[in-house]
Structures are given as C-alpha cells and as structure tokens.
Image: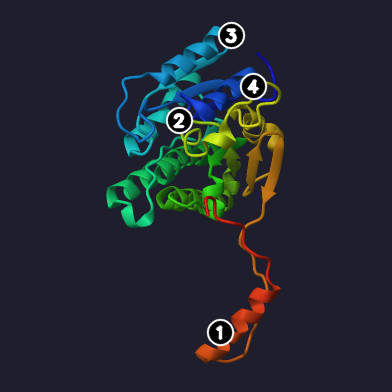
Amino acid sequence: MSGISEGRVVVVTGAGRGLGRAHALAFAAQGARLVVNDLGVGLDGTPDADGPAARVAAEIRAAGGEAVAHGGDIATPDGAASLVTTALETYGRLDTLVNNAGFLRDRMLVNLDEDDFDAVLRVHLKGHFLPLKHAAAHWRAETKAGRAPAARVVNTSSGAGLLGSVGQGNYSAAKAGIVALTLVAAAELARYGVQVNAIAPAARTRMTENTFAETMAAPAAGFDRMAPENVSPLVVWLGSAAGEGVTGRVFEAEAGRITVMEGWRPGPTADKGGRWTPSEAGEAVRKLLAEAEPPGAVYGA
C-alpha cells in the first residue's frame, strides 16, 4: 500500500469499532503501519469478552497492510506507556498518535453519580493525556538525539465539548478539557517537531446511534452522511507529513463538511478604569451582550 502515510507508524486508540476503526483502516490504505488499540469494553465501559482490536488488525493485514493489536488500558500509566513501547518494539518508530477511545454514562446533572463523572473523565480526558505524555517524551528524546520527528497528534473532542449537551455533563466536560489540552500540547511540543490538533466529529458510532437515532440512521440509498468513514480523510491528512504547519486547531468534521472551529477570544469589552458597583457592572453586561454574537445552542436544549 502507498499513499500520504507511507512509511509512517500510527497508533489509534479505541480503534476496534466506529470512528477508531475507520481511522485505522484509512491510515492503512494510505500506507501506514498500525498499532490498533482497544480495551474491548461495552458502551458504558464495562468489560466485554469481544476482541475488536485483534479483528481490526487482522482486517488490515488481510488487505495487505501491517498492523498489531494492543489491548491495554490507555488511561493507566502502564497501559499508555506500553502503547508507545509496542510501536517502537514492533516497527522501530512512532510518527502519529490518534486519541479516540471513550465511552458514555449519560445522566442529567441531578442524577449523575460521582463515579460516572469520574469514569468518563478518566477514559476520555486522562485517556488522551497519558498516551500524549508518553509519545511526547519519546519525540522529545528523538529531538535531543538529533532525529527531529515530523510527529502528529490528533485528539478527539466533540460538539458537546464546544457547545455542551443536555444529559452529558461528564462527557461535555471531558471533551472541553481535550480542547484545552490540545492547545497547550501544540504550544509546548512544537519545539520537538510535534503538531497537535483536535477534531469534533459527527458520525454514527455506538455512542451516537442510540442517543441521536434519527439523525444517525443510515439512508436506504445515496450518500451516508453519518458514516464514520467520512471523518477519517481529515484525520489521515492531519496525521501525515502533508499537514506541515497546521497545529493548535480544532476542526468539526461531518459528512462532506469540514469547519475550522474558532474558540474563545475577546468580544465586546467595557473598561470603567476603576471598580464597578454591582448595578453598574450589570448595566455594562447588558450593553455588552447586546453587541455580542449569541452563543451556539446546547445540544438537546
């Protein structure tokens, strides 16, 4: 296989199904060698006897590509470290990390247990941080050894992280944290030849096909707008050397549409030059909001 990822070694977490599987297959089709990670758990994160990572790796090899399966828990230090070690011991290098693993435990805030809040943040947010930390340590060592990498990281946020989503306070908080982590990593790791971006995809996966059943349903004929394979071309490009110079960005990807998301930046401002009284502050806020762009609607509101 040849393409824009030829010769690159790519790690994809949560690659046993849905978006992760689509990304892994798309990278392989462009010549990448894969480490396919998936813990093989149910939608809510509970253990599942299924072995999806091995199946996807076998699928890639059957098509003439190179892939190995990794079943470790990437939200643990040992699991994340072994992810990088697997790439280095198998292929001798690591070029791209795609952080994609996650699951849902949806509840309205008043019914959201602390355990369910912690579990979702652990897998989504910590499960991004730890693989990124270990991959970045490798790329820093490569740079100090005079082997400057053209390294790439693609993180997975969500529209829920950008706008919020009713019934998904834990998921929205985790996905918003991933955006901030992406911006910090892009700034800190640029000196080591690492580019870090994030996507906010909309596609049919185990996490969306029930929550947004009508929107995510596959059509009887024609273009399947919600197929996860629609998102993968952007991920492959961001994860390749072809994406040189693109870093610290968040992209929304859905169907055939790609959008550069523009986050928090100063809007209308009032400066008294001294301390406001509460009533003065309130009056100023009313005037500023009248000049400001309205916020996007929270999903499900």
The residue that appears at 57% across and 30% down in the rendered structure is 217
Mark 2–mark 1 distance (CA, rounded to whole Å) = 47 Å
Mark closest to the chain's N terminus, 2 or 4: 2
Picture mark count: 4
Mark closest to the chain's N terminus, 2 or 1: 2
Classify the position of the N terminus by image quarter.
top right
Mark 2–mark 3 distance (CA, rounded to whole Å) = 22 Å
Q: Residue 14 carries which label?
A: 2
Q: In this figure, which residue is indicated by the disc labeled 3?
A: 64
The residue that appears at 60% across and 24% down in the rendered structure is 27
Camera-nearest label, 3 or 1: 1
Q: Position of residue 244 (x, y in %)?
A: 70, 39
CB contact under 8 Å: marks 2 and 4: no
CB contact under 8 Å: marks 4 and 3: no
| Secondary-structure class at tag 1 | helix
Rendered position, 123 above or below 93 = below
Which amino acid, mark 2?
A: Gly
Q: Is residue 245 visible?
A: no
Q: In this figure, which residue is indicated by the disc labeled 1?
A: 282
Which amino acid, mark 4?
A: Ala
Q: Residues within 10 Å of mark 3 (few under 14, many from 20)?
A: few
| Secondary-structure class at tag 2 | loop
The residue that appears at 48% across and 23% down in the rendered structure is 35
Q: How crowded is mark 1: few (under 14 residues within 10 Å), some or many (20 or more)?
A: few
Rendered position, 272 above or below 203 = below
| Secondary-structure class at tag 4 | loop
The residue that appears at 59% across and 19% down in the rendered structure is 28
The reply, left or right, for residue 276 in relation to residue 133 is right
Mark closest to the chain's N terminus, 3 or 1: 3
Q: In this figure, which residue is indicated by the disc labeled 4?
A: 220
